[in-house]
Amino acid sequence: MKKNYYIILLLALTVIISVYFAPFLLHLKDIEYRMYLSEKLNSLGLKGIIALISFFALQLAIPFLPGEPLEIISGAIYGPILGLLYAQIGIFIGSYIVISLIRGLNLKVKKINKYKWLRNILDDPKRLNITVFSITLIPGFPKDIIPFFVSQTIMKKKDYFLINFIARIPSILSSTLIGSSLFHGNIWLGIFIFIIEFIIGILGLIFNKKIVQILTKKHRKEKSSNTKVERMESMSEIKCSALKCGYNENNTCHKKNIKVEGLFSRSKLGTFCQSFRNPIDETLFKEEMADEMSLDEHKVKIGCTANYCIYNKDNYCKASKITVGQKNAKYRSETQCDSFELK
């Protein structure tokens, strides 16, 4: 239902913008007016370029503002190629600011659960780059929200900037071509490109989720077939310990000083564990390993789940609502486990 409202809103904005700029487009038929406008815009020089780039960066920081009008204006003033270049520079600056601020201040995107299907894809390290490239190419997909999601993942900024630069070229170039065509009097060519882009954009907007699901379907099958083997190997080999580890909802440690140790804990990429432990004394570690061997039956029988679990250095859950289940986790005392699963 919300998607229908979004499509209706997009159509309404398109009609309003078209009506508003209609007089401007009609004036572009006049050669003298185009010459006058060209001289006026070129007189701005470097200030005009800086202003345009700044607008692109600002537009990306407010992701639900449409960027196509700016791209069309950029193409009209500076041509399709330079218009594309200035747009990419502005988008790069805006993306860099968004990702750096969110990661630097350790902020959480409040409405990220609204796009849970996208978040689940972006959290998959094996498909992260390919998926981001694919959804950036999808016409009609709100591309400017992607930096906000990328900031919550392990994706490197340089990888995202390269992917974003390449994947955005088709959509930006088509918009700058529209602007350039209109400015040089090729009204019908500009209108034709606009109609084609608009139709593709609407189709992409309607089917973007299905497209992403198709793109990731093969990976999900491969992942499900290998899950059991991977879990058995990792549970028998890897344990993680961390210094001042900051937990999030996925038990991901964002600190750098991580140590990988010996036994009975699932790990992903070395710094993504089912549970984290602070570095402990070697003697104590050996004693605990002996305890683990003597409590082997508990490891396969007992696990803990908790509502609103608060972790401390020993992974002790202080929440009152504790449930003892049948998942693979070592049981220490009534409400203390090696790992907790939030309900």
Image: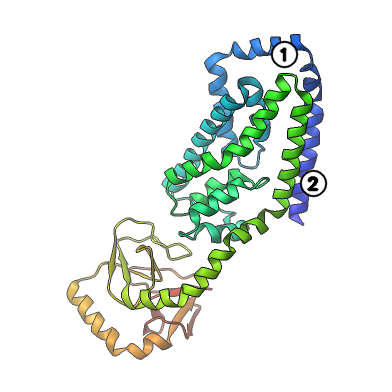
Horizontally, residue 180 falls left or right of residue 168, namely: right
Q: How is the image coloured?
A: rainbow
Could you tell me residue 78's position as x and y percent?
A: 60, 21
* Label number found at residue 312: none
22 shown above or below 309: above
The residue carrying mark 1 is 34
Secondary element at tag 2: helix
Observer-side mark, 1 or 2, equals: 1
| Image marks 1 and 2: residues in contact by CB distance under 8 Å | no
27 shown above or below 219: above
Could you tell me residue 115's position as x and y percent?
A: 61, 57
Q: Quadrant of the N terminus?
A: bottom right
* Label number found at residue 8: 2
Q: Residues within 10 Å of mark 2 (few under 14, many from 20)?
A: few
User: Residue 177: which quarter of the image?
Assistant: top right
So how many labels did they put on this image? Answer: 2
Q: Is residue 307 visible?
A: no
Residue type highlighted by circle 2: Ile
Please name whichever residue, 296 or 185, is drawn nearer the observer in this view of the structure.
185
Horizontally, residue 263 falls left or right of residue 172, namely: left
Horizontally, residue 218 falls left or right of residue 207, namely: left
Please name whichever residue, 228 or 100, is drawn nearer the observer in this view of the structure.
228
